[in-house]
Image (tube, grey):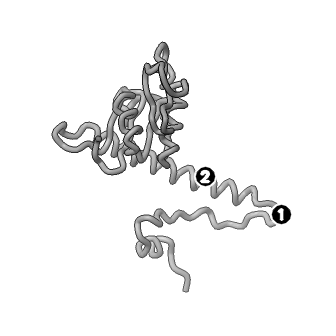
Amino acid sequence: MPYAPDTVAARLPASLRPVTTIASDPVSAASDDQLSARIGAALDGITAEAIGAVGGLVASSAAAAPDLVPAAVRGIDAVAGQLVAEQVAVLLVAADVAREGEGISYRIGPRPTDLRAGDADSGTEVPLEDGLVWAALHQDAIVVQLPDRASPLGGQPAAALLRRARAW
């Protein structure tokens, strides 16, 4: 007797969830286009839920009491500091983050996670958004571009969910 998806999901560790089913009606055997579209739609839904959950964590953690060790930070300077410390698990960036970098020189320093502002003596000059993403990806962080600076970003151009919930 086959298991129902909910029964299987209940027995899996959280790291293997969610279990998502796609429409089970027949698909063409000549092409996998129909099946691919269904799988793509399911993955889009899972991704949207995950981004929403991370956004909620960033919003609530960044607003936590200042005497607590932060689990998230907002703002270019705070995010850059956490990138240098290699503490960023998820980087959230507003689509218009480039406007923050206007007139300011950003450089990648001696390490790929070392993003610096205004240090003209060393490093390689990069656009702000490229430097943020480069530094995040070099510490295996997930990068999410948000359409605006609303909720999880709290009006800031960037925010980060931290790995160890500890600022350095």
Q: Secondary structure at mark 2?
A: helix
> Which of 137 and 16 lies nearest the eye of the viewer?
137
Name the residue at 37% across, 37% down. Answer: 152
Return the residue at label 2. 41
Return the residue at label 1. 30
Q: Amino acid at mark 2?
A: Ala
| Residue 162, percent from left and from top | 35, 45
Sequence-earlier tag: 2 or 1: 1
From the viewer's perspective, is residue 10 above or below residue 119? Answer: below
Q: Secondary structure at mark 1?
A: loop
Name the residue at 19% across, 37% down. Answer: 66
The quadrant the N terminus occupies is bottom right
Q: How busy is the neighbourhood of tag 1: few (under 14 within 10 Å), some, or many (20 plus)?
A: few
Q: Left of 39 or right of it: where is 50?
A: left
| Residue 129, percent from left and from top | 52, 29
From the viewer's perspective, is residue 38 above or below residue 107? Answer: below
